[in-house]
Image: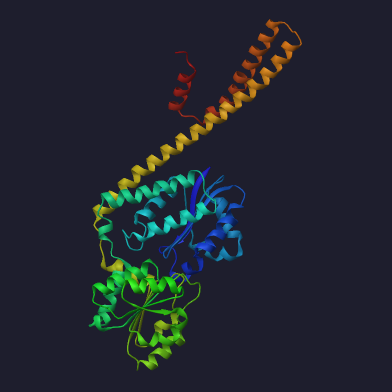
Amino acid sequence: MTISVIGLNHKSANIDIREKFSFTADSASLLLRRIKKVRDILEVIVVSTCNRTEIYCESTNGADDIKNWLLSEKEYKSFAKHLYIHQEEDAIEHLFKVVAGLDSMVIGESEVLGQVKTAYKIALDNKSIDGKLKRLFEYSFSVAKNVRTNTDIGGNAISFMYTSILLIKKIFSTVEEKKCLLIGAGEMTELALKYLKSNNVNDITICNRKEEKGKKLALENSCRYSNLNNLSTIIHDYDVIITSTSSSLPLIGKGNIENALIKRNNDSIVIIDLGVPRDVESQIKNLDNVYLYTIDDLGQIIEKNYKIREKSIKDAEEIIKFKIVEYKNWLSENNSTEIIKNYREYVDDITNGIVIKAKRMAKNSEDINQIIDYVSETLKKKLAHETTIKLKELYPNLDEDKIEKLNKLFKEN
């Protein structure tokens, strides 16, 4: 059985592609159920974040099982040239780097760990993992904790939100006087509140579709609340808009912003779109006095302006190497347990059959010596002759060390 991963990320595809190959919790659950029906795929997890969508599998024939299925589905064929594939140790290492923040657009960021844990829970809920892949993801969470505890990599991370605030301050010299609209009520909105408040921005409105959650967040942070249905009627009132939702369609269209600019007498608007798929139509970037930044734009700025200490990365990579060995040792133990179990069942099948025949012979009052000879000869034939044939088949695949260990196994003590 082979562990493999197929996917795309910010390195292999821009946001135009990534937003079309992203999954909500519900759509990820549906995808898991579809993939589980594919022959030879035993376990599967779908990880979908702002910067990546990856499908991890344990399957009979390796990555070909999931790749062939994915590219046979009409809706996924167009992503072929953007996909990367890792198998076995490369797949294990890749996952460990993802959860540790080494494969992120922002090196060292911690949000991805929570997103992977969510993907793991969705897989558990859908019963799409129960063996090696389940254990692998449990190991990955240990890797992330180890890296964050024993290296400075997390402390070196410049977040998307921190970069967003720097951009806003670059455009508005007096940012504390500006009115800000936050669309969504998730982790990124909470992070935006933290950074805005620390920069003395207090005129903030939270706009969310789920009223209870939006109102609760607004009350906790002394902000106003507005339902998402009112967005088009209030949008002109804000200088800064930060949006991060899981909407599958844009929430803000070009017409919305054109109307807002007229009402604002063309006063500048800064829009930070952290949604994948995007919450804001890309054509808005062409409007005068509108500064629109997507998650890719922020990533490029971070990459140009931030150099993480190399020691932190090297320390993290050493931890990952150790954890790979640890997981592979677990795999070996798990595989050996399975082999032993299968061998014992094989021996049980043989002996059970012989015992039944011996009892039948005894019931028919056959000579005890004949019964003993039958049991002895049949056991030798089954356990020695058939095992010898199997050993001959295996021999060409063994190295000298394994041959020596095998010889010692059958020598008398």
Q: Is residue 266 above or below residue 78?
A: below
Q: Residue at x 38, y 56 (%)?
A: 113
Q: Is residue 273 above or below residue 364?
A: below
On the rendered structure, is 327 left or right of 155?
Answer: right
On the rendered structure, is 290 left or right of 118?
Answer: left
On the rendered structure, is 368 left or right of 253?
Answer: right
Residue 23 x/y as whole percent: 50, 64
Q: Quadrant of residue 112?
A: bottom left
Q: Is residue 14 above or below residue 340?
A: below
Q: Give the tally of numbered discs.
A: 0
As rendered, which of 193 and 152 lies closer to the eye?
Answer: 193
Residue 338 x/y as whole percent: 52, 33
Q: Is residue 277 above or below residue 254?
A: above
Q: Residue at x 36, y 47 (%)?
A: 142
Residue 334 seen in this snapshot: yes
Colour style of the rendered protein structure = rainbow
Q: Residue at x 46, y 29 (%)?
A: 399
Residue 287 seen in this snapshot: no
Q: Quadrant of residue 278?
A: bottom left
